[in-house]
Image (cartoon, helix red, strand yellow):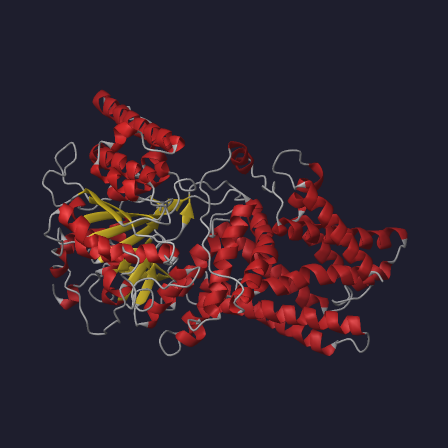
Amino acid sequence: MAENDYAPLFETKQVKGRILFRSIAASILLGICFICTYRVWFFPAEGKAERLAWIGLFLSELWFTLYWFLISVSRWNSVHRIPYVHRLSQRFGKELPGVDIFVCTADPLLEPPSMVVNTVLSVMAYDYPPEKLSIYLSDDGGSDLTFYAMLEAADFSKTWLPFCNKFKVEPRSPEAYFRTASEPDNDPVNVQQWLLVKKAYEDMKMRIEATTKLNRIPPHIRKQHKGFREWDFVSSKRDHQTILQILIDGRDSNAVDIEGNALPTLVYLAREKRPQHHHNFKAGAMNALIRVSSKISNGPIILNVDCDMYSNNSESIKYSLCLFMDEEKGDEVAYVQFPQSFYNLTKNDPYAASFRVIQKLELVGLDANGGPCYIGTGCFHRREALCGKKYEKNHKVDWKKLNHTRAEESASLLEETCKVLASCTFEHNTPWGKEMGLKYGFAVEDIVTGLSIQCRGWKSMYLNPERVGFLGVAPITLMQLLVQHTRWAEGHLQIFLSKYCPLLHGYKKIPLKLRLGYCPFNLWAANCLATLYYVVVPCLCLLKGISLFPKISSPWVLPFAYVAFAHRAYSLGEFIWCGGTFRGWCNDQRIWMFKRTTSYFFALFETILKLLGYSQLAFIVTAKVVDEDVSKRYDSEQIEFGAASPMFDIIATLAMLNLFGSFGAIKKIIFEANQDFIDQFGLQIFLCLVLVTINLPVYQAIFFRKDNGKMPTSVTCKSIIFALLACTLAMY
């Protein structure tokens, strides 16, 4: 191909609306300058309480300004990538690289085997040459129930894969497909086949769920496969040998579907675990998969997905390869990150779990500045970059040479020789977990791993196609959400306070904008102090008669009003532009406050304890199974409280505090007919009323709801007592 005839495999386009964003950001910055001027100019001349409250509020506003600035910088230039799959097919034809797909699960009770099976089947059925696909399931629960489910998946794949190709199935998760699809009506033969496959899936699902409910493998099933003998030597899920089984050997000419087409390789792995050896959670599982897969299939591209993130787009591999295999820019790409999306979101998303703005605006901003962070799932990696190789500027990949790297040994021999690669002691005195593979010692090992890859000279790219690449399960209770964000916020702050702080570790290695772009995520937990101050102190000062904002009649009220209005109005516009609703935006603001006052506070506290040596790293698996009543309340978009928790104590206490503050202000206005009070404290009253409005579902859960999702009585009593006590102390 002549140089002037070169057609790129992907195109980079600037995101629309940059001029509007920059104009709004510039005007908000001007308003912030006026606010800072007011804080300095009108600093209280007397009164210790007034001065302290003023200083605290000013410091909180400075923190919010810094945080807003970091987000604005990362979004100043935003781009999105457009892959051209037809060019990929024309240029490379059948010379496409092998792809190894890692699926990770950890607990058959919290992550049901039937769900894992659907994820595995969805990635087995990619629109990609099956002989070049290898799927590896890491079962960190070491469960024979999950192993049995994989045997069922291996058998059902012989029917499912040709069915997907014939009917152009999307998505290729059987559960997701049959949940929404209707039988074809154009051909009786097709209808019959469609119904037979659906029944075959339902029968398989019923067998898996029955076995899971029984919590043991029946003897007649155990006799059907040699792999079950491994569990004769398993003491517990934390104490067992390596279990490695090649369930489908894609190299075997007999490994074919019902139409005689080749099947992808399917491997089950439960790495060795012993109580005396730390297993490093998901990072350890991923590193074991990297080593084992290097001996079996050694695909130059690795995709990793969580067990609840099924493939929703059968062309995702080809989309990512357009970025990896582009002759001009592809050689510098270490990983391609897809967004983390969810199929169980309701219209107004009461827990703000969709990450709408982050995915459509913030991550594309990072992409323009050097690449998005690695978020742990839905990510395609270049194997050599993930294994620690540094980027070499003039290095060119010959993809054709990478196509013939599969092992020649028999499946049984590979099973035995690869077991040592997943043993507890293999990594001792090796670079694994430090220079190779995923990093150890962090709750968000994915983020620090992606940062380290970028610091070795590689770039990453973000791909958000019109048809979402992967869909998972979002939390459907408030407690699930808050616990999840506590772990994330704690892990991010841990990175910021470690040697991997982007500002230091990335110095002279990655662009300044990218280093700053990591900081808003790393500093999630640090937001709690300023937010708690802004939620608590203005309310208490209102009761005590301490003014913290300019009078309504003063021209100095304008910058405060403009910054608050412009920032929230633009936020609403962005949210709706990203596909949300007004109620969804209100829910987003509510959850934003809940997370900052609870999850981030506990994450900050836990991080401090760890720095002082009083706590150890832990990993919490979020449950993917829920009660039917909880599901109904989620579908009706009611926030689920239902259990006593220190987090709910904080949420309820802050809600009651602002309710009492608002009542106190209204009392003075009505019964004392004090018009000067409105002028003097108008903004503080408005702030209290806004917080009361945000907390309306909390008041409903405290006073009016009768279902099991209401606020527990113990939490209600404590919150009222704490709020009354704070108000009483403030008025003296």
- The answer to whether residue 16 is visible is no
Residue drawn at the location 61% of the way across and 71% of the way down: 62
Q: Position of residue 556 (x, y in %)?
A: 72, 70
Which is more toward the observer, 732 or 582?
732
Q: How many marks?
A: 0
| Quadrant position of the C terminus in the picture | bottom right
- The answer to whether residue 393 is visible is yes
Q: Position of residue 136 (x, y in %)?
A: 26, 48
Residue drawn at the location 78% of the way across and 55% of the way down: 725
Residue drawn at the location 10% of the way across and 52% of the way down: 408
**Residue at the extreme right of the image, as rendered:** 672
**Residue at the extreme top of the image, as rendered:** 188
Q: Position of residue 722 (x, y in %)?
A: 74, 53
Q: Position of residue 38 (x, y in %)?
A: 70, 74
User: In the rendered view, does 491 fall on the left or right side of 388?
Assistant: right
User: In the rendered view, does 397 fall on the left or right side of 617?
Assistant: left
User: In the rendered view, does 442 fall on the left or right side of 404?
Assistant: right
Residue drawn at the location 9% of the way across and 41% of the way down: 253
